[in-house]
Image (cartoon, rainbow, N blue to C red):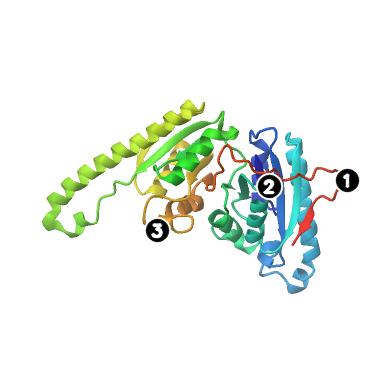
Amino acid sequence: MRVVLAVDGSIAADRARDFVARLALPADTIVRAVAVMDGGPALSGTSWSEDASESKHGTESHRQHLLQALDTTRSTLEAAGLSHVDSVLLLGEPAHSIIAEADEYHADLLVVGHRGRGALATTLLGSTSTALVEHAHCPVLVVREPHAGRVLLADDGSASSREAVEAVARWPIFEHLPITVVSVADVRIPIAIEVQPGIYEQVVESYIESADTAREQTTSIAARTADKLAAAGRHARFEMHEGAPAAGIVEAATSLGVDLIVMGTRGHTGLARLALGGTARSVVLHAPCSVLVVRGLRAADAEVPLATPRTDDTAPVAATRS
């Protein structure tokens, strides 16, 4: 397995690093820690309100800060038993540089903390983390806390959900974790009931029938997926929840006290086809726990050459690329 871990020396990045260190990764896993050198204040850790004379001298100190973060990451992961760890300091715009590195590295997984350093850290996930989730070509794990115990697998029966199911069924990191498959039935009362009283009875009858069908289909989806995971040796159960999809997943994660949500990138219809998809985007932004968004899952028998790890202790802590 090939993992790219984005770090920047922030507390959030440290949590992502510790999350990776605690995962039950295959023995031959190769981890590449990456940091990006960009002179913008929101990415260098300086505040927009800081004195300019202080900021203009921050470039070299920021570089040293990133190199130290890479060195600490490598040491932490090696101490956790990962023998193939290397690091690279990239030059350029953070999200673009990290995605390009993950592509070149043929990454199976890209890991990032839920917020970065600097001014943009206060907005949602931060610009870099959001861009990685929306535009990376491989699964992206957004880490909020440095541990994974209980897992919620969101399944709506779509093709993207099937990728998420395959990841949980195949990846060794899920082998001993309790998994709850959650499917959400969208059975909200249609607006027509409120605005068209003349056809109230017909609308209610139709709503009840369609809601019952939705519940049955949703329960069936969750049950089949739980059976598939059990057949793959996973500890799986299922639940059916009701409501708007994103809110239902977040509420289920909160009530179940899970540490990780796993889901695909797109649902069935409408705006879900755009970018990350409305449901997945909302879950990533509002979940109380880490979220693994699965896309671009490689076939189990895909033959992709392994990138060569830098493990020479005499080499610099990080190579630098532009």
| Element type at mark 2 | helix
| Element type at mark 3 | helix
Q: Amino acid at mark 2?
A: Asp
* Crowd band around label 3 with a 10 angstrom C-alpha radius: few (<14), some (14–19), many (20+): few
Tell me, for residue 139, which label it has, or none. Answer: none
Which residue is disc 1 drawn over?
314
Q: Is residue 114 above or below residue 209?
A: below
Query: Is there any visible trace of residue 129 in the rendered image?
Result: yes
Quarter of the image containing the C terminus? bottom right
Which residue is disc 3 drawn over?
271
Compute the Cα span from label 3 to label 2.
34 Å
Which residue is disc 2 drawn over?
14
Q: Position of residue 95 (x, y in %)?
A: 63, 59
* Crowd band around label 2 with a 10 angstrom C-alpha radius: few (<14), some (14–19), many (20+): many
Compute the Cα span from label 2 to label 1.
25 Å
Q: Can you tell which quarter of the image residue 28 is in?
A: top right
Task: Give the camera-side residue of 136 and 200.
Answer: 136
Please name the residue shown 34% across and 34% down the image: 220
Task: Give the camera-side residue of 84 and 303.
Answer: 303
Residue farthest along the bottom direction in this orientation: 52
Q: Position of residue 173 (x, y in %)?
A: 59, 34
Compute the Cα span from label 3 to label 1.
51 Å
